[in-house]
Image (tube, rainbow, N blue to C red):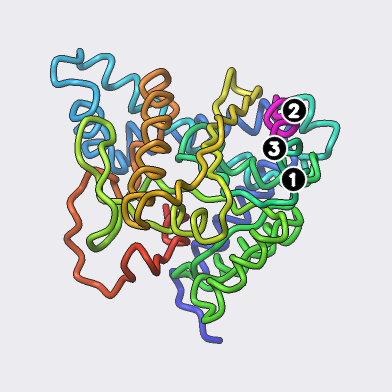
């Protein structure tokens, strides 16, 4: 395969920072990430104006400029912290993971449910170090799988897949023609589908109230749950400090077969997004306000996308 110079340069930079993040102690690696976040925010100013506009849109136009700047800056820093956590996959031994994270209660609740033999959909927003869920599944022996898309940079795509393979996570490519059947089989045999679903749908999807406005959501999460007859467990991961992480697993949202499919999809999605919103408003600085697919944007991209009955849920992993 012929790689473009841009692909090679991006991959080389990624490998360089991976090397730096892995040879440094955790706090120093995070300090390096914080420095990169400062550069991105104050020098490069990557999507900063958009993020501040979104913060005002959600938290109120009367929010002081100093507070808007604080939330936007910390959100950028936490994004780089998340990158550090992802690239330090060798760091996360079981002992270190248990030292720096509090996932035990959430894991115990999920294991108790899985004794029933049913699977589940575990849905989380882009908040805190959301990528730690994959390593947590290995540490606490949770049968996790997820759906992934293909990155534009093929070298980056191969690198990410190697990382995921290195942590034991199961990734299903979203362009697999047998995707729906494979997801159903895994859910019906007691496995857990992990999803990040706080991105807008590119075409008309499921309308819910979120962050003070109507959001147009992809319907994959609710479709999978109802079709496999499994619940949705909303989950949030947030940082208590630079190095300490906590996971909250909320009560399960079961399908309601007294409702029509469309009404039930909407109900389950709305309940999940409401739980997200409550947590985001408590800790707005930990939410990823820089997302390219901002959830409150109207759908404007006229691209083929299945209806809520045939969603492309892995789009929800796109940054």
- Residue 209 location, quadrant: top left
Sequence-wise first label, 1 or 2: 2
The residue where tag 1 is placed is 116
State the image coordinates of residue 11 (x, y, percent, origin top left): 55, 63
Count of all numbered marks drawn on residues in the image: 3
**Viewer-side residue, 47 vs 124:** 124
Q: Is residue 308 magenta?
A: no
Whole-angstrom CA distance, mark 1 to mark 2, is 19 Å
Q: Main secondary structure of the magenta part?
A: helix
Q: Secondary structure at mark 3?
A: helix
Identify the residue position indicated by label 3 in the image.
110
Q: Residue at x 45, y 34 (%)?
A: 37
Range shown magenta: 102-110
Q: Residue at x 23, y 34 (%)?
A: 54
Q: Residue furthest front?
A: 258
- The residue carrying pointer 3 sits among few (fewer than 14), some (14 to 19) or many (20 or more) residues within 10 Å by Cα, namely some
Residue 106 is inside the magenta segment: yes
Residue 64 located left or right of residue 122 = left
Residue bearing mark 2: 104
| Residue at mark 3 to residue at mark 2: CA–CA distance | 10 Å
Q: Nearer the viewer, residue 139 or 270?
A: 270
List x then y, in percent, for residue 67: 28, 15
In primary-sequence order, the first of circles 1 and 3 is 3
Q: Could you say whether the residue bearing mark 1 is in a helix, strand or loop?
A: loop
Q: Residue furthest left?
A: 61
Q: How many residues crowd mark 1 within 10 Å: few (<14), some (14–19), many (20+)?
A: few
Give the label on residue 141, or none. Answer: none
On the image, the x and y values in percent for residue 90 come to: 78, 46
């Amino acid at each position: 395969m012929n790689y473009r110079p841009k692909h090679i340069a991006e991959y080389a930079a990624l490998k360089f920072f991976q090397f730096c993040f892995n040879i440094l102690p955790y706090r120093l690696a995070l300090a390096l990430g914080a420095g990169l976040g400062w550069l991105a925010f104050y020098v490069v100013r990557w999507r900063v104006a958009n993020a501040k506009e979104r913060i005002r849109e959600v938290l109120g136009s009367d929010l002081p400029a100093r507070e808007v700047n604080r939330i936007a800056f910390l959100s950028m820093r936490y994004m780089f912290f998340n990158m550090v956590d992802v690239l330090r996959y060798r760091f996360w031994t079981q002992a270190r993971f248990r030292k720096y994270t509090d996932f035990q209660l959430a894991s115990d609740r999920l294991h108790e449910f899985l004794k029933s033999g049913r699977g589940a959909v575990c849905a989380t927003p882009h908040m805190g170090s959301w990528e730690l869920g994959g390593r947590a599944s290995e540490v606490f022996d949770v049968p996790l799988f997820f759906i992934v898309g293909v990155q534009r940079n093929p070298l980056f795509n191969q690198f990410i897949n190697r990382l995921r393979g290195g942590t034991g996570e199961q990734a299903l490519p979203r362009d697999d023609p047998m995707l729906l059947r494979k997801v159903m089989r895994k859910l019906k045999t007691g496995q857990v589908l992990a999803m990040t679903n706080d991105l807008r749908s590119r075409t008309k999807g499921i309308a819910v109230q979120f962050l003070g406005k109507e959001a147009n959501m992809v319907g994959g999460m609710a479709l999978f749950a109802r079709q496999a007859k499994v619940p949705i467990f909303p989950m949030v991961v947030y940082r208590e400090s630079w190095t300490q992480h906590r996971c909250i697993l909320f009560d399960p949202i079961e399908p309601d077969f007294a409702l029509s499919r469309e009404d039930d999809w909407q109900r389950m999605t709305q309940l999940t997004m409401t739980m997200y919103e409550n947590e985001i408003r408590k800790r707005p600085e930990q939410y990823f306000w820089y997302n390219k697919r901002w959830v409150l944007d109207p759908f404007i991209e006229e691209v083929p996308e299945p209806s809520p009955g045939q969603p492309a849920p892995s789009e929800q992993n796109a940054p």
